[in-house]
Image (cartoon, rainbow, N blue to C red):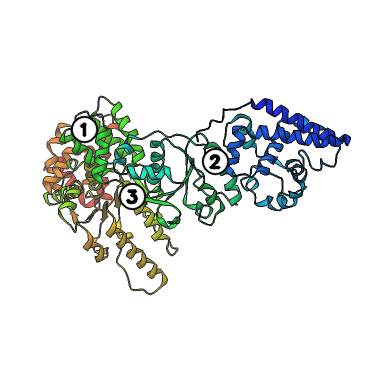
Amino acid sequence: MTESLSEHFEPQHELERALAKSFFLVGSALQSNDESLGDSVSKLHQALERILSQQRFKFVSRCFELSDYELKLIGLVFIQAIEPDSLTPYLGLTWYEQGPYLSLDKLLTLALKQPQRKAKVSSELRTSNVFQWGLLRSNTIPSLTESIYLAPELLRFLQTGEVVMGETCMFSQPILGEIDGAFLILNEAAKDFSDDFTNQQLNSVFNKDIEFARWYAIQVASNQGAMVSMLTNEEPEGLTQTQIRYDLAWLLLFAHKKKVIVLLPQWAKSFFDSKAETIQGLKRQPNLACCFICDSTSYIDDAMFNVREVKYPSELTLTDIWLELSPVNTPTEQDRLHARNVATRYPVPIPHIQTLVSQAALNERADFWQALAKLCLLEQKKGPSDLATLIEPRYRLSDMVLSDGALEQLQELVARNNYQSELKRRLPRYTKGCKALFWGRPGTGKSMAAEAIAGELQLPVYVVNLANIASKWIGETEKHLANLFDEAQRCNAVLMFDEADAVFAKRSKVESSHDKNANMGVSYLLQRMEHYSGLLLLSTNLKANLDEAFIRRFHSVVEFALPNHDQRKAIWERVVGDNGNDALLADLDKLAKRFELSAAQIINITETALLQSLMLEQQTIDKGNIAKALRRELSKQHEGFMAQHEIRDWLEGN
């Protein structure tokens, strides 16, 4: 729009006073039954036409496609609102039927130069734009005897030229968003869409990730210099087409200054389909465009909307984004490798990338890529709520004492995740994801191995809360599993099912509804496990309890056996460390040889012995502390009495 609302032939406040005076004189002539009433009405029309020629009124007329009499009605109601004293002569007349303004019937009498048109105009009023858009309103359905008032937002606009969105408005105040550096890199291949987006009134952007689609639409609008307004994500109760039109009217007023893009959620489909009256009005508004944000095309009318699927960037593009936004001036091949690892390991929402990069760059003492990886790991903490518990990895594979075979398999699991891009490129039938089963006696390191793998990959671990997964209600278990896998997939988390035989048990012969429900849960697990592209780990003490269909789908089945003598000695040395006295440290080899303990038992014994030494105010752990703690640990398995002789011999050095 080339016209400026500030351009006037006469100051508007002078025209307002002249119109108020004319309006007052008409009332006075009516009150006194003066023969000059015709002249007074004629002067009223002249004053009315002068103020309606002002840019604000002309803009309202064009914007809402108002007829001549509709605009005159607005002018008459406007002067009553800003100059209420002009109504004084009408107070004693039948003209003043309903307060505080004149009735619609009397306003029409004043607005129309040809009274014979009044009947025709009256029949058209309910469907006229001035009432359809809510510019003029009444307390009930508009009728000739009702008092008519001006919408507050329109009153303010006509007085000041400003538009302020009210608190009850469904649409947010339009703002000009900041352009994200990630978008500038991503948008290189979508410039044609940016042009279409701002040149057409009805658009749709869809992607399975709604938040990504919304961010992209905002960025396109901001990049084209357009402001953005949003309709609330949750549908209010009792919302009507009328309310939508009323609230949309203020956006139309706001858009006189700059292009405004309105982002619409999926629930608003019925209010903006091809049959909705609102759509026809919007198609004629050059400064206002609507954009549906949805996860599929089923929510919009392809014939009405300019539809665009926004594809999520590939790992290569994400690598470029991380690298370009990093503070590294001259990236090396090692920097690109770091950027690729961040892109593949951490599915950070694109709108957060710029913030995380800026935060990592602030820590000058730390390596940028290490600091960034830690921040990305913290970003993944929004896990699958009450269905799983977040465990931040505390270990690496180097912290574990394992057999060569078990260690090699765990290293392969890490490598499979690190090289999945290369595997996918060179193997056409390769599918993303990695599934492994850890099995063996309790305390042999299954849970610690899951943390160690996550530590190597710098990924979060989500340990499934089995009690919250299973449900006696049909379909609820599957629903919980779906939420769990979807959320873990989004976070690219290491998903750990501890005591997996509780939910991955063998399917049984159906003899009751309970059996059928349990089998359905197992079958659903098979399906989701097959398509999960993250790292899925299961641990169990009894591999034989698992359904054979699951075993076939594992990339690795790792047995965690009790450590042998050399491994036990290494574990004792690591756990005791500098806390033992010389006599104890010198005798750890014999201790490891005499007692076949798991790693967890060795840790428990050492912790108990250290606590005893502290209670006795000893500086270090001695053999007596270990013997007492050992006796207590073995008594858990009813072996305390049988082990007394062995413990005594070890203490005596035999």
Q: Which residue is mark 1?
A: 579
Percent across and percent down for residue 159 are 63, 30
Residue that badge 2 annotates: 252
The answer for how far apart the CA atoms under marks 3 and 2 are is: 43 Å
Q: Secondary structure at mark 3?
A: helix
Examine the rendering and report whether any part of residue 628 can be seen. Answer: no
Q: Give the CA distance from mark 3 to mark 1.
A: 40 Å
Q: Nearer the viewer, residue 434 or 11?
A: 11
Cβ–Cβ under 8 Å for marks 3 and 2: no
| Residue 563 vertical placement versus 91 (above, below) | below
Instruction: Name the image quarter holding residue 78.
Output: top right
Residue, x 56% and y 49% (percent of image)? 236
> Residue 325: which numbered mark, if any?
none
Q: Tell me: residue 165, above or below residue 646.
A: above
Instruction: Tell me what residue is drawn at x 74 percent, y 30 percent.
Output: 20
Label 2 SS: helix
Q: Quadrant of the C terminus?
A: top left
Question: Closer to the camera: disc 3 or disc 1?
Answer: 3
Q: Which residue is mark 3?
A: 488
Amino acid type assigned to the residue bearing label 1 in the image: Asn
Residue flagged by tag 3: what amino acid is it?
A: Ala
**Which class describes the residues within 10 Å of circle 1: few (<14), some (14-19), or many (20+)?**
some
Q: Earlier in the sequence, mark 3 or mark 1?
A: 3
Label count reads: 3
293 and 608: which is toward the camera: 293
* Place of residue 225 in the rendered image (x, y in percent of width and height, measured from the top left): 42, 35
Give residue 356's quadrant in the image: top left
Label 2 or label 1, whichever lies nearer to me, is 2
Q: 57 or 300, which is in the foreground?
A: 57
